[in-house]
Amino acid sequence: MSNCVALQKSLGTSVLTQDHILIQLKKEEQLTSETRELLQKQICSLLHKLSTLKEIRTQLLADFQDKGEAIKLTTKCITHEVNTPSSQLPAGQYKPNHVTYDKWLSHCRDLRLTADNLIKDSSTLRGNLRFTIANLKNAQERQRRSTDDCLRKKINELSRFQDMMIWERQQIKGEISDLTNDIQKVTGQIRNCDSKLHQATHRLDILNQRPRHELCLDQPHFSLTLEKYDLTKMAAGLHPVLKQSQQELGLTRRRLMILEDKLAKNAHTLDVEQKCQNLHQSFLPTLDTIVVLANKPQIPSTMGRSSPHAYLQ
């Protein structure tokens, strides 16, 4: 779980500003940590209870053996024949440390009550532990599903965004291709106009070399002058078109660079989210661990809280 959180934190700060996945992962990490701490406390409690049960079991076995021996001796006492040789016991051989009957009866009663109470406590502890584990498993499963839903939604969103940007990149590349073709056409038209203008000017210069009265404003001179004027006007009109197309091409290429940067960042984010999803899914057990809660009297009122401590209060 810590590796998932570390993967998410590897993304930029701008991505993590409102990252619901990181929030869910931190919740799951905190829930797992609290569950581990709670189970460790339960293990300590169980070990203490087991030690107490072993101790009372040892006392009960010793008491059982003592009572069995007492029964044998009492039976022997009842069936004992006074005149037998074995009945002659040396004086002072036994110095018994007697206890009162009430004290003996109290000892038996206390031992039995202690054993009964320990058994009841152990049974209650096992029932509470089963109930607690069931709630913890369900809480972890709910949080795991919530995290998985966030990851799946984020990956789908990033994939759609990636596809949309790829489509937009193709459109921009098409625009760049069209603008490049337009610039080439306009450049060719300007070059053609300049060539024709140079030719018309040269022809007009030749015509202006006619001698004396032959140098008149006749139809050839008028036609060449008009052609030169039209070509000059056409070339002047094509230059702004070329400049505008070049500016649009520069802006479009700038848009493509920005889009390529977004594509790279989105692809990196998508890769991180997919790695996080694969890592998160690797935590799944081989078998279904969802526990259906059994009926239990006096369910704690705090079980609606997400913290595992709520189930033991």
Image (spheres, rainbow, N blue to C red):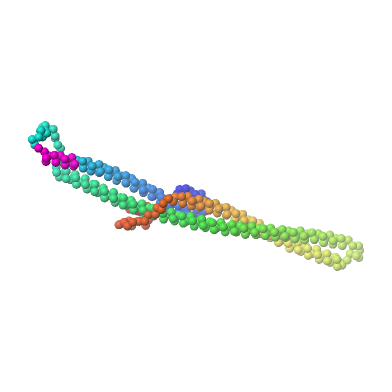
- Span highlighted in magenta in the image: 67-81
**Residue 182, located in which quarter of the rendered image?**
bottom right
- Left or right placement of residue 146 versus residue 215 in this view: left
Whether residue 15 is visible, yes or no, is yes
Foreground residue among 202 and 124:
124
Of residue 52 and residue 207, the one placed in the foreground of this image is 52
Q: Is residue 213 above or below residue 141?
A: below
Apparent side of residue 225 relative to residue 121 in the rendered image (left or right): right
Seen at 56% across and 56% down, the residue is: 162
Q: Nearer the viewer, residue 159 or 64?
A: 64
Residue 232, picture quadrant: bottom right
- Farthest residue to the left: give it: 83
Q: Is the magenta region chiefly helix, strand or loop?
A: helix
Q: Residue at x 14, y 43 (%)?
A: 101
Residue 3 shown left or right of residue 243 in the figure:
left
Q: Position of residue 277 (x, y in %)?
A: 48, 52
Q: Could one spot residue 20 in this view of the protein?
A: no
Q: In the image, residue 313 lies at what x, y percent?
A: 33, 53
Residue 312 in the image, given as x and y percentages of width and height: 33, 52
Find the residue positioned furthest to the bottom.
219
Residue at the far top in the pictured view: 90
Q: How many marks?
A: 0
Examine the structure image and report whether residue 69 is included in the region drawn in magenta. yes
Is 135 inside the magenta-drawn segment? no
Question: Residue drawn at (41%, 51%), measured in percent from left and top?
Answer: 287
Residue 111 x, y percent position in the rendering: 21, 45
Residue at point 22%, 48% (across, down): 113
